[in-house]
Image (cartoon, grey):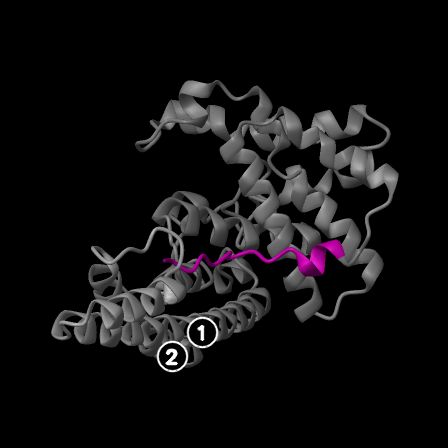
Amino acid sequence: MSEQFDFYDKTSLKSYNLDESMRYQLNMLDSLDVFTRKHCENVAALTVRLCEKLHCTKGFTEYCTICAYLHDIGKLFIPPEILQKPGKLTDEEFEVMKTHTTIGYNMCMKDLKLRPYAAGPYYHHEALNGTGYPRGLTKKDIPYEGQIIRVADEFDAIVSKRQYKSHIGISDTLKILIENTKPGEDIKKSDALSVIAENTKLGKNNPLIVRKLFKVVIEDIEYEIYLTLNYLDNLKGEIQRLKQVDKYYRSMEKTKSKKKKEYYLNGMNILFKKDETVENFQSVLEEYKKSLERKKKDINTLYHEIKVIKKLRV
């Protein structure tokens, strides 16, 4: 048995009951490859929650969510050998990859229904300190939605690359975002002429949005702990059930009475669940016990993860 945990619960997203015209924009995702589409959905789901933590209005949150859904739509026209390359891109390949921002922007501008959301594709890789792309804009020129989507995009990209199945170790991802939020770290000497002096005090990410991301992640860890505790209760119940089966089995082995043997065997069969048998129930019981211990360790690790995140500073 295993407990599945979804990093991106879309309950909040669904609560906005996107109308028919908005569904049109979301249908654009059907043309994307599976990985990119999932990434767009994840970034949108996270964007909703960041907007809520930032106390954005419902209207802005809906708008920002659609922008997030469409932020990578330009990847439709990036060659698959570059888009799906498992290793690091060459400088030439990266230049091609960067064009997905302007391609996505142009796609939106050419479609009246998509035009209002062109900011999603266009600004999500701009950095507050002017080191982003496609235009190298600085904080004053980067719309708030672009700043929010950038943080959601960066977080999901790292999470997806590391293939997390749980929030165990997620603080390491947040530390990467913190590094990208620190001022001056990424500005090379060659950039100094084009970056206003005050921007050297900025990092790539908006620190307020990153702090709100911490809150979202902590909530998710607490929810994962809650689910795992419920799973533990279920495991304990299964263990107790099979312990009772084991008692019947040991009693059956000891008695010489045929009638009593049948009695104990009937008791075992009543307690058995699908695919459990007299021959395998003990191995199933041992697996439950091992799973129980693993999950207990996971819970302790998740509580520790919360402590680590609460100590992080942006």
Residue under circle 1? Answer: 225
Q: Residue at horizontal 76%, vertical 40%?
A: 117
Which comes before the other along the chain, label 1 or label 2? 1
The location of residue 296, given as percent across then percent down, is: 31, 76
Q: Residue at horizontal 39%, vertical 55%?
A: 165
Q: Secondary structure at mark 1?
A: helix
Q: Residue at horizontal 45%, vertical 49%?
A: 192
Residue 49 visible? The answer is: yes
Question: Does the CB distance between marks 1 and 2 fall below 8 Å?
Answer: yes
Between 122 and 203, which is closer to the camera in this rendering? 122
Residue 147 visible? The answer is: no
The location of residue 64, given as percent across then percent down, is: 73, 51
Residue under circle 2? Answer: 303
Between 241 and 58, which is closer to the camera in this rendering? 241
Task: Tell me if 198 is positioned left or right of 240 in this view.
Answer: right
**Magenta-tinted stretch:** 1-14
